[in-house]
Image: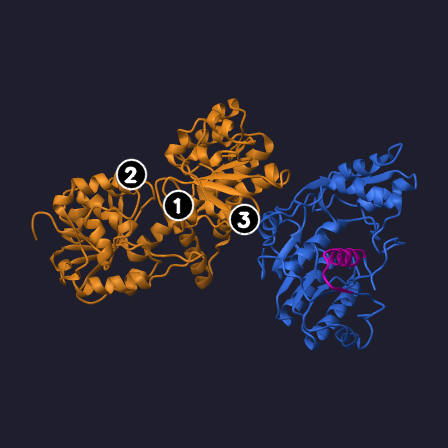
Amino acid sequence: MLAHAHEKPVIPKRAVVIGAGGFVGGAILKEIQKANIPALGITRKDADLLSAGSGEALAALLKPDDAVVFVSAIAPAKNAAQVMTNLRMGEAAIAAFAAVPPAHLIYISSDAVYADDATPVTERSPVAPSTTHGLMHVARELMFRSEYKGPFAILRPTLIYGAGDPHSGYGPNRFRKLAAKGEPIGLFGEGEEKRDHVAVEDVARLVVRILLHGSSGVLNAVTGVATSFHDIARIVAGEFGPPARIELVPRPGPRPHLLHRFFDITDAYKSFPDFKYEALATGLKRVHREVQAGLLTPRGNSRIPAPD
Amino acid sequence: MSSKPKIAYAGMTHLGLCSSVGGSSKGFPMLGFDTDPALVARLEQGKLPVVEPDLDDMLAANRDHMAFTSDPARLRDCDVVYIAPDVPTDDMGGSDLSGLDSLLELVLANTRPDAVVVVLSQVPPGYTRARQRQGRQLYYQVETLVFGRAVERATQPERFIVGAPDGVTLPPALRAYLEAFGCPLLPMRFESAELTKISINCCLVASVTVANTLAELCERIGADWSEIAPALKLDKRIGAYSYLSPGLGLAGGNLERDLATVIRFSEEYGTDAGLIKAFVASSKHRKDWALRTLHELVLARKPDARLAVLGLAYKENTHSVKNSPSLALIRHLAPWPLTVFDPVVPASAAPHPNVTGAPSALDAVKGADALAIMTPWPEFKKLDPAAIAGAMAGKTVLDPYRVLDPAKAKAAGLDHRLLGVA
């Protein structure tokens, strides 16, 4: 659960988003700007965290009273090399924070840090990742936690969807792309696995709240509603006319160990009592409309101006 | 020693006061001692600081052989002196034993060497043996106080569990007092007695945790725990008096303290406490049932909802709000205007920036979009669901303790939400 430094919102001097060129980082920066918080978006062009001396380059962009949101990642980290790449990015950031300690640090992590059998998942569930992606986030959480001594918040989003999602992993974005091409939406097995999905805009709105309240601690960015991939496919298919075809295909391997994942979002009720997540069906329909209209978030041929 | 030993209880908080009044009802000359003269003055006037059924009447009926004092010298006349202050606990369930230790020293300094001194307060294993001293008779007795049933428990105990230096022998004065209650006496070694108290509470918690875990499943799959629990109670291996009523997690502090003690000892001695930790986690989860249900049913759909809460005390027939599920809920309802009513606890106890105290239960629910009945006070059971439905703006009533009759609530058109029912 989060602890708030400010019971009532206080606008930080400046919010800096490291990784503002990405799908999630771009959405966060946009929401910060919408909240009239002075903002700086840092992309790879501004400071490539994998290049030599990147810590100094990043430090040169920071001010001591900045609230920093660290989003940069090569995600998902599918193998050891990608894990190490992400850790080097974290290392560079830590070097920068040692030189110019931020007033507040928010790390965008992932629900992949939790053990597969933790259900319903809460912020106190055991951190025991079963994937290299989860391992990477756990390691970076620990790196930041041990090296940065200021107020530190970790936001752990579940599966994120949005109009500018560049990924094509199994889920709503891939389903929509397949349907748009006139191809059937392929579901493994019966598509019975239930997962929570959160809109990227909701993740961004949570970040803004954390910034305004100077919060520290851990919060999951999850809606508390788990929906089967079959139901998600039906929602997405229904947005097309005629509705896209759904095709059940044999699983490439055994049924996944993590069949369903449910979250208990009581901590969200306590941290931000009046925060409301967008329902998945509503969000998917909105995303469809935005994609049709070409209103993508900064990543991916956006009509919305990219941050500086 | 006269025909009946003279008994004293030191520490006139909930445990000591109820135990001494209960003991006086057996005809023993009784002295209630406390270091606070103001408290003693109020007790002398019959003004009791705790609310328990029958306590005031029982005290009045036994005043001819029951006295109160703040003068420790008067303990010198007593044959058996119980040390019985409530031991405070912190948020993590840890005990603060400093007050108990101070009182023990005071009593030992002001009693005769042949007096029996009995620690009645709840202590961790090892406490009594560590405080044994040459030439004194120090014993430990398990207390089984239940808030709201303290007098009944003090006058009709199921058994007495007493820790003795040799694990067997009880001094005549103590034995005479305890035998007057007509229940089995179980002398045992100190550590066993101290752990018996914790073991009792762990068994109670286990039953409650089973009920809560399966009640939540009932809520999702269309079952009704109130139909299941009676069937379980007819099973002799489970028992007619087993704690199978679902609730809002553990409250009051004593059960949590015992779980914390087991976890602390397991860490110190390397034993497995995974089950106990699961009890704690389950309790935390269940405590938020009302908050989750309110969000799902009302707050997610009506951002400007008006809320009402009946009951602030942690359970009926007590003024205590420590670990109260009601206050735990109210703490997280800050964005919504709230009206509360409790027969004993004032609205000022509610941790809420926009709370209004109502003069009655029905006044509290007027205009509310949702109502949560968070303490099962007897007077709430007399409320007419139709009157509630007529007064409320909305229909949602969270009733975790089944205060309202479900059939009448349904007939009144209320969306009556209970623990363990789909």
Under tag 1, what secondary structure? Answer: loop
Residue type at numbered disc 3 = His
Q: Which mark is residue B245?
A: none
- Which stretch is magenta? A23-40
Rendered orange, the chain in question is B
Please tell me how crowded label 2 is: few (under 14), some (14-19), or many (20+) other residues with Cα within 10 Å: some
The residue to which callout 1 is attached is B346
- Badge 3 and badge 1 in a common chain: yes
Question: Spatial distance from mark 3 to mark 1, Cα to Cα?
Answer: 19 Å
Point out the frontmost of discs 3 and 2: 3
In this view, the residue farthest toward the top is: B411
Q: Is residue B180 left or right of residue A208?
A: left
User: Relative to B310, is B166 on the left or the right?
Assistant: left
Question: In which image quadrant can residue B151 be found?
Answer: top left
Residues flagged by tags 1 and 2 on a common chain:
yes
Q: Residue at x 86, y 57 (%)?
A: A305
Q: In x, y percent, where is residue B313?
A: 40, 44
Q: Which badge, 3 or 1, comes first in the chain's sequence?
A: 3
Query: Outermost residue, right direction?
Result: A181
For disc 2, the marked residue is B53
Q: Which mark is residue B332?
A: 3
Label 1 neighbourhood size at 10 Å, few (<14), some (14-19), many (20+)?
some
Q: Amino acid at mark 1?
A: Pro
Indicate whether residue B378 is drawn in magenta: no
Q: How is the image coloured?
A: by chain
Question: Does residue A217 sit above or below B43 in this rendering?
Answer: below
Q: Is residue B169 visible?
A: no
**Chain A visual colour:** blue
Q: Is residue A245 visible?
A: yes
